[in-house]
Image (tube, helix red, strand yellow):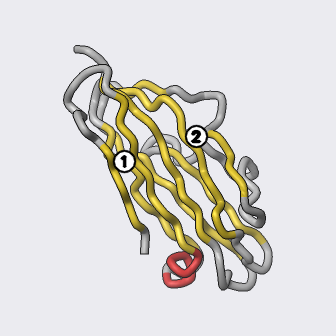
Amino acid sequence: MSRVSTSAAKPDVAGVVNYSEVYIFAEDAVAGSGSHTANLLAIPANARVLRGAADIEEAFDAGTTNVLIVGDEDDDDHFLAAGDVNEAATGVTAFASNTPKRYTAAKTLKAKYSYTGTAPTIGRARVWCEWVRLGE
């Protein structure tokens, strides 16, 4: 099961940095027949994602491939694409160089783990981002 944590002390105040994170677990993808998508953040209109990363806390061990991507409703791998993260080893991968990204309309940021081959028995990733609401 995904676990989401959002620290949005003042999400309606321009200039205040907010933090959101979600955990992705291998067993969720097994239960989901090969993939699992978790909502990272419902970012409001007129906001900007400043930075973020995927932290593989426990390596995924699927038989053929492990893939973690992070994006939004328009581009599911805008922040991290297939091949950006080594899901089979622990470590941190920062969001791609196309961050920061400004949102003029409200969107949902998502993290998706998928695999092929033998189902994974272990694996845990924490995906996080910092964002700020912009002035009108």
Q: Is residue 82 left or right of residue 41?
A: right
Question: Label 2's element?
Answer: loop
Q: Mark 1 to mark 2: distance in Å?
A: 13 Å
Which residue in the structure is indicated by mark 1? 41
Q: Residues within 10 Å of mark 1 (few under 14, many from 20)?
A: many
Measured along the vertical axis of the image, is residue 40 above or below residue 50? Answer: below
Asked which quadrant contains residue 122, the reply is bottom right
10 Å neighbourhood of mark 2: few (<14), some, or many (≥20)?
A: many
Residue 79 marker: 2
- Taking the spot 74% from the left edge, 76% from the top edge, the residue there is 61
The relative height of residue 12 versus residue 120 in the rendered view (above or below) is above
Residue 78 at x, y percent in the picture: 57, 39
Mark 1 secondary-structure assignment: strand
Residue 23's label in the rendered image is: none
* Residues under numbered marks 1 and 2 in contact, where contact means CB atoms less than 8 Å apart: no
Residue at 69% from the left image edge and 72% from the top image edge: 60
Q: Residue pushed farthest top? A: 136
Percent position of residue 23, x then y: 49, 63
Give me the residue at 27% from left, 35% from top. Answer: 44
Quadrant showing the C terminus: top left
Out of 25 and 38, give the one closest to the viewer: 25
- Give the left or right position of residue 69, taking residue 8 as reference: right
Instruction: Residue 18: give x, y in percent of width and height.
Output: 35, 36
Q: Quadrant of residue 38?
A: bottom left
- Left or right, 116 with respect to 41, comes to right
Ranked by sequence position, the earlier of labels 1 and 2 is: 1
Q: Which kind of residue does numbered mark 1 sit on?
A: Leu
Q: What residue appears at the point 45 percent right and 58 percent down from the top-left corner?
A: 22
Q: Which is nearer the eye, 134 or 103?
A: 134
User: For this view, does 20 lie left or right of residue 54?
Assistant: left
Which quadrant of the figure has residue 112? Answer: bottom right
Q: Amino acid at mark 2?
A: Phe
